[in-house]
Amino acid sequence: MSTTLPQQHDLTTKTVGQLVVERPLRARVFEKHGIDFCCGGKIPLTEACEKKGINLDAIVAELSETDATAPDIDLVHASLTELADHIEATHHASLRRELPRLETLARKVAAVHGDEHPELVALRDEFLHFKQDMESHALKEEQILFPAIRDLDRGSVNPSRPFGTVKHPIRVMLAEHDDAGASLSRMRQLTSNFTPPPTACNSYRALFAGLEELEQDTHRHVHKENEALFPRAIEKEAQR
């Protein structure tokens, strides 16, 4: 793999989503500055910086620095099977580990501090809704969509699959990604950008920190599917 870093022109003329597809760790820069590389990542970097009032040269410098680090997976050259396996082993595993832990914290913090801070009760309810949806979402990917994508990668077709084309379950997953993004945005609003009050206890702080990490991991999860796995699977099926 070439270690040549991209020129500034290459960075500024591509969409935010494309930039993260090429080098996934660029997501860290966009997360730091609140730039949506996930569902809203279809705009050029220049436009994204203008909308946020961020200096373009500063972002390019940070991206170039990040590019010196190897990506977690090559979204361009990895096989469809490798991508699906990576998403399950990395992001689905993180959900199964973190969602139960955060549920315990959300219930505890709402019970102890909810009278004084009613937004914590709303936060608990929003999180429980998110948790239920994401657990169902991951299960559908693992049991329905990803096996079909792996079949495509092997060049085989399972006639027992009821949905015909992978476009149908992908359309459902994309809609659920949008719902997850909206739910995460509501949790960010309810927590004032995941900022606990100065008097917050350790559980309070742990909950907010965990939710922020959950948001970041979900953005990376959704991006890998929306911008790499799903379009490549649709293209592969079309070639058949």
Image: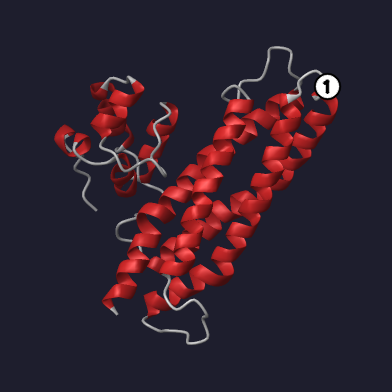
Q: Where is residue 199 in the image (x, y as percent from the top left)?
A: 74, 13
Q: In this view, does 188 lie to the left or right of 48?
A: right
Q: Nearer the viewer, residue 52 or 225?
A: 52
Which residue is located at x 36 percent, y 53 percent? Answer: 227
Q: Which residue is drawn at 79% across and 30% down?
A: 110
Kind of residue indicated by mark 1: Asp
Q: Quadrant of residue 14?
A: top left
Q: In which quarter of the image is residue 16?
A: top left
Label 1: which secondary element? loop
Q: Position of residue 238 (x, y in %)?
A: 29, 74
Number of residues whose C-alpha sits closer than 10 Å to that of mark 1, classed few (under 14), some (14–19) or many (20 or more): few
Asked if residue 23 shows in the view, the reply is: yes
Vertical comparison of 43 with 205: above or below = below
Q: Residue at (62%, 50%) from the top-left corner?
A: 95
Q: Name the residue under label 1.
A: 115
Q: Which residue lies furthest to the top in this view?
A: 198
Which scheme is used to colour this image of the protein? secondary structure
Q: In this view, does 35 lie above or below 4?
A: above
User: Is residue 182 left or right of 58 when viewed as pictured?
Assistant: right
Instruction: Give the percent coordinates (x, y) of residue 114.
Output: 80, 25
Quarter of the C terminus within the rendering: bottom left
- Pinpoint residue 96: horizontal percent, then vertical percent: 66, 53
The residue lying toward the viewer, choosing from 84 and 127, is 127
Depicted 131 relative to depicted 46: above or below: below
- Residue 96 seen by the camera: no
Q: Residue at x 30, y 26 (%)?
A: 49
Q: In which quarter of the image is residue 225?
A: bottom left
Q: Number of numbered discs present?
A: 1
